[in-house]
């Protein structure tokens, strides 16, 4: 390990940035990731990566010998299916998750046009094998069992009454070399969600006590022969309780992320023998703890927790393991534009690894460390150069009622004041971290200042911030909307933004916010761009009513039931709108766009509509032609049709 650290210490690179670059062609931004999912084999002899060789092509897997990266690689494709993900399961066998478009139209809410399968390829025997279980999800790669994985699926389909409430899963162990599978456990309501250790032994389960309305946790660490209940939580509690792992040296000690009566989520010990919380490991005053870090050698130390993570301006890790921390620090000195950097795979002997970095000035770059050589393997977006990308600042401002709103500000190269766009995230009850945001960077590259506010309701900032979106009734279109406007007014006040050149763009809930903004009486925007937008609150809520229980039902329904519904506010629309929607969107079905367009037409309100044929709600269904059409429509609209004279 000392030799590894000394090699890393010798490798250091500095990159200088230019000023005022010409915008890239929008084709560059429309490209899907050129390479991704880079991993080294357990024996360190091969490195595999997923590559999209042409702008409109499907991914292939390429496998190179680490001793000579110039050699012609072993290639795998899954035509007519598309490779979504791969992972090594032994020195010779790679597992894959595939999808295929099997329908032209969605079959209802959350029932899209793709089906998913598992497959494997033996690179030594050049043998591809597909497995017939539709919708299977990988649970564990089982480093302690060669060629085997654990997968799960939802029996009876997504729409059974049981699945709507708790979604219990059924678990199998699968031998990817022979195709043999062994049933481990059938999901049931009172014990439906399992975790397995690196040897495939189940150690954690979660169930639901329907008679008491309580979530129940079970463990098999103190007694490997039977399940023992150790924790219950009322389904109406808004507090977090999540088991992140266990102490491999003292297995009766769990690591849990929990509020435990506090506003911010911390990392706690939970003593199974005592049946109660133990010591507080780590908590912050500004943000929630987001989880833990496991040892980077997943083959030999699969279950060892080595640090605790949180997110503010970046992902930060407080390490328990000194060697893991030192390795991370050395790598951060080696990699250009180091921002969020991690070892994403490692050989069983620990000597070889792949490293991934992503940040505002790096769309995502992969490196290989092998036999003392540190080699750049490639970038997700090789046409985008660091000096032509934009910096991201983490700022905080005060909303009109005094609440502090954190935000990410993507700043174009040039001098302010800039034309500015507020880009609220979807969800709305999610966490956002602006490591590298393609939409924000594309807009900044075209001269726009981009604000991503963590408006009330955003997760990761404590219970009070989260619950403030619905605790006094749904605040969609109300205080949640004020948070976005107040952020833009703050940028104007600080001299960053031009008050006569402001716009809003969002997707999903962000699209909803854009529609609400278009109807605000105190208008500050010149136009709104709404992607995959919820236009009718009740239509969206009705998809969920039978699928939610407890606090989840309370938060979702109260938020949407009590918030402004854009389709009811069309008569107040006072700025032009660009609507964008995928025609097979399963999460916000296209009826939302159709209903809103009809209302706009009836009142002769100015708008344009762009339909993305074959696009679902999610980013991994936006192919090159979708993204090119989206970006060309957005930039053209902002320049020419966004208020008088454009933005």
Image (cartoon, rainbow, N blue to C red):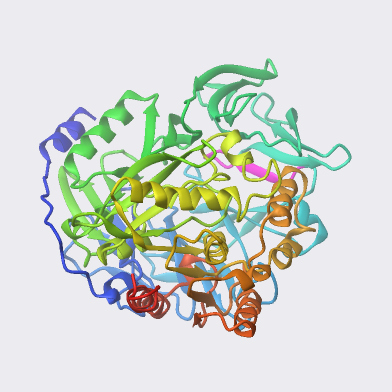
Q: Is residue 528 in the magenta section?
A: no
Of residues 429 and 567, the one nearer the viewer is 567
How far from the left and from the top, in percent, is residue 94?
Answer: 42, 60
Whether residue 132 appears in this view of the structure is: no
Q: Residue at x 53, y 50 (%)?
A: 482
Q: Residue at x 77, y 44 (%)?
A: 550
Q: Quadrant of the N terminus?
A: top left
Q: Is residue 13 left or right of residue 560?
A: left
What are the residue bounds of the magenta stretch? 191-200
Magenta: main secondary structure equals: loop
Residue farthest to the front?
522
Q: Residue at x 20, y 45 (%)?
A: 335
How far from the left and from the top, in percent, is residue 199?
Answer: 54, 40
Query: In this rendering, is residue 434 above or below 626?
Result: above
Q: Quadrant of the C terminus?
A: bottom left
Of residues 256 and 457, the one nearer the viewer is 457
Q: Is residue 113 left or right of residue 90?
A: right
How far from the left and from the top, in percent, is residue 621?
Answer: 49, 71
Q: Is residue 299 left or right of residue 139?
A: left
Whether residue 113 appears in this view of the structure is: yes
Query: In this rendering, is residue 359 above or below 325?
Result: below
Q: Is residue 196 in the magenta section?
A: yes
Q: Is residue 56 left or right of residue 557?
A: left
Which image quadrant for residue 219? top right
Which image quadrant for residue 564? bottom right
Query: In this rendering, is residue 415 above or below 542?
Result: above
Of residues 42 and 159, the one nearer the viewer is 159
């Amino acid at each position: 390990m000392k030799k590894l650290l000394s090699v890393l210490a010798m490798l250091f690179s500095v990159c200088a940035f230019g000023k005022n670059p010409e915008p890239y062609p929008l084709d560059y931004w429309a490209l899907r990731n050129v390479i991704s999912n880079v991993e080294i084999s357990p024996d360190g002899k091969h490195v595999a990566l997923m590559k999209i060789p042409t702008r409109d092509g499907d991914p292939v897997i390429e496998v190179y010998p680490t001793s000579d990266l110039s050699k012609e690689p072993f290639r795998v494709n899954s035509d007519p299916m598309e490779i979504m993900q791969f992972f090594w399961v032994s020195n010779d066998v790679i597992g894959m998750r595939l999808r295929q478009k099997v329908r032209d139209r969605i079959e209802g809410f959350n029932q899209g046009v793709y089906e998913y399968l598992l497959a494997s390829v033996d690179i030594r025997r050049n043998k591809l094998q597909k497995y017939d279980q539709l919708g299977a999800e990988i649970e564990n790669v089982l480093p302690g069992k060669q060629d085997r994985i654990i997968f799960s699926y939802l029996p009876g389909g997504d729409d059974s009454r049981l699945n709507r409430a708790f979604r219990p899963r059924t678990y199998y162990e699968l031998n990817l070399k022979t195709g043999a599978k062994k049933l481990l456990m059938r999901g049931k309501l009172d014990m439906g969600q399992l975790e397995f250790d690196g040897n495939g032994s189940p150690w954690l389960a979660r169930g639901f006590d329907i008679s008491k309305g309580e979530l129940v946790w079970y463990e098999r660490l103190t007694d490997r022969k039977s399940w023992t209940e150790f924790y219950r939580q009322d389904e109406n509690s808004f507090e977090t309780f999540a088991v992140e792992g266990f102490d491999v040296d003292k297995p009766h000690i769990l690591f849990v992320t929990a509020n435990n009566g506090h506003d911010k989520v911390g990392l706690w010990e939970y003593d199974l023998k005592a049946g109660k919380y133990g010591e507080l490991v780590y908590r912050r005053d500004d943000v929630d703890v987001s989880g833990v870090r496991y040892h980077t050698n997943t083959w030999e130390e699969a279950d060892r927790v080595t640090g605790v993570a949180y997110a503010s301006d970046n992902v930060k890790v407080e390490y328990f393991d000194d060697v893991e921390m030192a390795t991370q620090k050395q790598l951060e000195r080696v990699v250009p534009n180091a921002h969020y950097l991690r070892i994403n795979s490692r050989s069983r002997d620990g000597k070889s690894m792949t490293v991934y970095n992503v940040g505002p000035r790096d769309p995502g770059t992969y490196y290989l460390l092998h036999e003392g050589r540190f080699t750049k393997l490639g970038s997700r977006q090789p046409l985008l150069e660091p000096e032509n990308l934009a910096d991201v600042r983490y700022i905080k401002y005060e909303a009109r009622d005094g609440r502090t709103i954190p935000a990410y500000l993507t700043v174009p190269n040039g001098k302010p004041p800039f034309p500015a766009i507020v880009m609220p995230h979807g969800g709305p009850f999610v966490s956002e971290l602006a490591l590298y945001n393609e939409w924000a960077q594309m807009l900044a590259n075209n001269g726009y200042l981009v604000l991503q506010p963590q408006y009330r309701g955003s997760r990761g900032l404590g219970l009070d911030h989260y619950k403030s979106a619905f605790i006094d009734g749904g605040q969609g279109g109300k205080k949640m909307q004020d948070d976005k406007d107040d952020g833009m007014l703050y940028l104007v006040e600080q001299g960053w933004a031009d008050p006569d050149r402001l716009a809003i763009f969002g997707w999903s809930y962000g699209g909803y916010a854009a529609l609400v903004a278009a109807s605000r009486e105190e208008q500050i925007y010149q136009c709104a761009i709404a992607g995959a937008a919820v236009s009718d609150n009740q239509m969206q809520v009705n998809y969920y009513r039978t699928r939610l229980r407890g606090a989840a039902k309370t938060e979702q329904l109260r938020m949407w039931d009590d918030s402004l519904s854009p389709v009811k506010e069309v008569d107040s629309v006072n700025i032009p709108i660009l609507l964008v929607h995928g025609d097979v969107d399963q999460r916000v079905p296209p009826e939302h766009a159709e209903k809103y367009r009809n209302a706009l037409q009836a009142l002769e309100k100015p708008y344009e509509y762009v339909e993305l044929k074959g696009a679902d709600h999610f980013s991994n269904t936006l192919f090159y032609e979708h993204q090119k059409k989206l970006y060309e429509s957005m930039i053209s609209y902002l320049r020419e049709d966004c208020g008088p004279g454009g933005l």
